[in-house]
Image (tube, grey):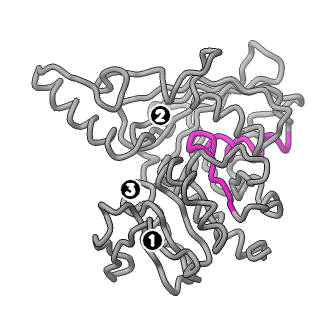
Amino acid sequence: MDIAIVGATGNVGRKTLEVLEKKELSIDNLYLVASSKSAGKKISFKGKEHEVFNLENFDFSKVKIAFFAAGGKISEKFAEKAAKHCLVIDNSSFYRMDPDVPLIVPQVNSNHLEQIKKNIIANPNCSTAQLVIALKPLHDLFVIKRIVVSTYQSVSGGGKAPMDELIEQTKLVLDGKDVKSKNFTKQIAFNAIPHIDVFSDDGYTKEELKMTNETKKILDSKIDLTATCVRLPISVSHSESVNLQFEKPFSLEKIKEALNNFEGCKVIDERVDGGYSTPLEAEGKDETFISRIREDKTIENGLNLWIVSDNLLRGAALNAVEIAETLIKNNFYGK
């Protein structure tokens, strides 16, 4: 298998390389692709130095699969050109709601891979990916009617520049100096910002609408979902406080059993100090962690959950690589 990674020098591109190093995918030739300013750089993969190629003149006929990890504008300009020669797995938001492009979390809706029309597969928003992987086994058993979710998202969801700025701002605050935000609407250090992406006319942000629309496309169009997305001064991992209402009654024992038996999920739910997962513990882990599992006694068939996952892994690089693995395993590839 010959593979390309577009945006290989960015956060998600580098994380994709890390995932591929751990996986069993047989890679004959790996091509690292980025903008002209990064062309010529060297990146190590499995002990070998790989030169970065210029995206503007890269020949996609050399590869079978291209991972796009460079943002929506790059995908808009280059993904369909690449898809004429190879299969594209796109991490950006550009194609997610395209009816001709499947939006995939392999553990949840791998059957949708049979619907590939443009030779492009979309990867969901990182906050959506960890949500649906935890909700899929519960929806199968008890049928989710409504979801209320508040997210607590790390700065890495915005890329490397916001991560660097968090460190810079933190140092300035500790030194008693003034802070001027460059990548955030307000100071992020020692703060919380209830605003991710641009506002729509109805007052919701684009990030919040992504969660609604993508969850419906991946899991079930009948589910009602409302979201509030908040940026926290955390480097990596997103957390979500989730309130569910089911159509059917449930027991907490069945909930935990279903989650623990579902691929990619891990329950850490002890009702003692520290008996739950936090962003720090989720960093670098493949699993989606579910804690604080308890009945919501204010509504019929109501449940509360705390969900934590490494957004760069679960929500981006790992999910993209698992899509490629699923294509090959289930013989969807090449159709």
Report the front residue among 261 and 17. Answer: 17
- Name the residue tied to disc 1: 57
| Residue placed furthest toward the bottom | 28
Residue 217 falls in which quadrant of the image? top right
Asked if marks 2 and 1 touch (Cβ < 8 Å), the reply is: no
Q: Disc 1 residue type? A: Asn
Circle 2 residues within 10 Å: few <14, some 14–19, many ≥20: many
Give, as a single range, the part of the protein colored magenta: 120-141
Identify the residue at horizontal 68%, vertical 44% (top origin): 134
Q: Disc 2 residue type? A: Gln
Q: Is residue 199 left or right of residue 174?
A: right
| Dominant secondary-structure state across the stretch colored magenta | helix
| Residue placed furthest toward the front | 57
Asked if marks 3 and 1 touch (Cβ < 8 Å), the reply is: no
> In this view of the protein, can residue 261 be seen by the observer?
no
Residue 10: mark in rendering: 3
Residue 122 drawn at (x, y percent): 65, 54
Q: Tell us which disc is closer to us: 2 or 1.
A: 1
Pointer 2 or 3: first along the chain: 3
Pointer 2 or 1: first along the chain: 1
Asked if marks 2 and 3 touch (Cβ < 8 Å), the reply is: no
Residue 146 drawn at (x, y percent): 78, 26
Q: Disc 3 residue type? A: Gly
- Name the residue tied to disc 2: 153
Pointer 3 or 1: first along the chain: 3
